[in-house]
Amino acid sequence: MFGKGLLKGLSITIKRLYGPNLTEYYPEVKPILPTRTRSSMVLEPEKCISCGLCINACPNQVIILTSEKDEKNKKVLQTYHMNMGRCLLCGLCTEACPTKALKLCQVYENAVYHRQELLWDMIARSKQANISSGKVE
Amino acid sequence: MMIEGTQEYSLNMGPQHPSTHGVFRMVVHLDGEVVTKVEPKIGYLHRGLEKMAESRTYTQFIPYTDRLDYLAGPHNSLGYVQAVEKLMDTEVPERAEYLRIIFAELGRIASHLVMIASGSLDISGWTPWSYCFRDRERILDLFEMTAGNRMTPNYFRIGGVSQDVPEEFMPALKSFLEDMPEMIEEYYGIFFGNEIAQSRMKSVGILPKELAENLLITGANLRASGVQYDVRKAEPYGIYDRFDFEIPVLYGCDTYDRHFIRLLEIQESKKIIEQAYKDIPAGPVMTKVPKVLKPPVGKVYHRVENPKGEMGWYIVSNGSTKPARVRIRTGAFVNVQMLPEIVKGWKIQDLVTIFASMDLVLGEVDK
Ligand code: SF4
Ligand code: SF4
């Protein structure tokens, strides 16, 4: 009978109509992402030994860092920038970091108005509480 | 046949047309509403991935492979990492092999769900679209909790996978598998069994078997034209030979069958994942590989069955840390050829459905 399929479809829709609501009310309700999600980066400058392994691992030359040698001939991190406009958020840099100074975090509201703002000063950012805790407030 | 006093009309469809599923442009020649000729124009999404591979190390190129068929990231990476492993003669731990299969097949299900969803949306069926996307979301959640990203997981590594699955993965996978029969029934009830959908798709856009073979069409499009060919069976890679599954084949050669075969393939993928879920051993997920990869001088060709068709990786190594040449054979790129052949004589509204049934993803077409 023509129309049987249509009725079947309608009955499924009606059944679902009384099912649970699946919509997320973003941005009023902010989801908490799994801890492995790669949506942003955070650096702990005290842990960084300026070894440069993250730079070598990165496919896109996102990371720029400078360091100076102290009296014990040990490298001390001076500046650490990430050019996020080029970043794939692939996580290869964090995988390569031997001291886990560079870590992924789940801050996902990263949109900015100007291109220059995409050059992240990671040392300055590490001092912002919401970013270092890795959660969207 | 032209009516006297009228002339052929050519219309640009795309590159920003919503039904072209990306940035695809076709120049449509029309006689009234009837399509007389279609010229596909590709390249709007060209990123030069093959060239990029030459300037990156073997590991650094893995994240880019996800961006070929971005609806099913894992299977592209699978082809690439297996090709490099073949070149280097690397063994992969058992657990990693199983995880690879689970991810690759979940990716196939996700990709086919998008195909069914957008196919229905193109004939104004909003509800099936939201149902398919609802379930695909669960697969993407599984990717996210394990690999850290939804559509570009970057999960596979040369020699294994980046990390083991988290504790909550297996229960979530199990509940997804348990819910699948009901989902499939729903898709059937709401879309495939719907008479309006059927009358829009049945006997529309015929791709005869001979033509499909001559045009080197691969993947589900070929199987909907009556050829039972799948690389997973024809030349099993990874551990596909250990699983018991069928290669569905349909003989309708039309738009409906090209949609319906995806539903059948989802069921077969489910079977594979269930077996992998049952048999997966414990153990390491990454074998010992040097930090700096330098495959020996040589070349390799490896092919896999990704959701869009046969994907081939040809990699030439000159012994350095970066490949000398990478050539990617993608299913969707070759499948574009069928479009001008099968739309001739159909109305412009049918062009949209026929195009949807080909399941092109422009990341793969343009590379
Ligand atoms: S996430 Fe990837 S692209 Fe971004 S800085 Fe790290 S290695 Fe580079
Ligand atoms: S790899 Fe880690 S420790 Fe080394 S420079 Fe990068 S952030 Fe610092």
Image (spheres, rainbow, N blue to C red):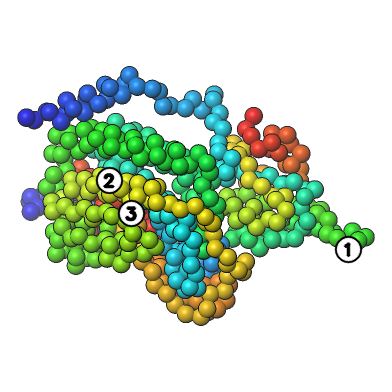
- Image quadrant where one finds the C terminus of chain B: bottom left
Q: CA distance from mark 1 to mark 2?
A: 62 Å
Element type at mark 2:
helix
Count of marks placed on residues:
3
Q: Chain of mark 3?
A: B
Q: Nearer the viewer, mark 1 or mark 2?
A: 2
Residue at the spot of label 2: B267
Do marks 2 and 3 share a chain? Answer: yes
Residue at the spot of label 1: A73
Q: Position of residue B319 (x, y in %)?
A: 55, 78
Q: Chain of mark 1?
A: A
Q: Chain of mark 2?
A: B
Give, as a three-letter code, the residue at label 1.
Asn
- Image quadrant where one finds the N terminus of chain B: bottom left
- Compared with A28, B296 (above or below) is below
Q: Which mark is on residue B307?
A: 3
**Left or right: A97, with B317 as reference point:** right
**Left or right: B111, with B208 as reference point:** right
Element type at mark 1:
loop
Which one is earlier in the sequence, the residue at label 2 or at label 3? Answer: 2
Q: CA distance from mark 3 to mark 1?
A: 55 Å
Res. A15 in view: yes
Q: Nearer the viewer, mark 2 or mark 3?
A: 2
- Compared with B292, B119 (above or below) is above
Q: Residue at x 64, y 52 (%)?
A: A94
Q: Position of residue B267 (x, y in %)?
A: 27, 45
- Compared with A35, B317 (above or below) is below
Give, as a three-letter code, the residue at label 2.
Gln
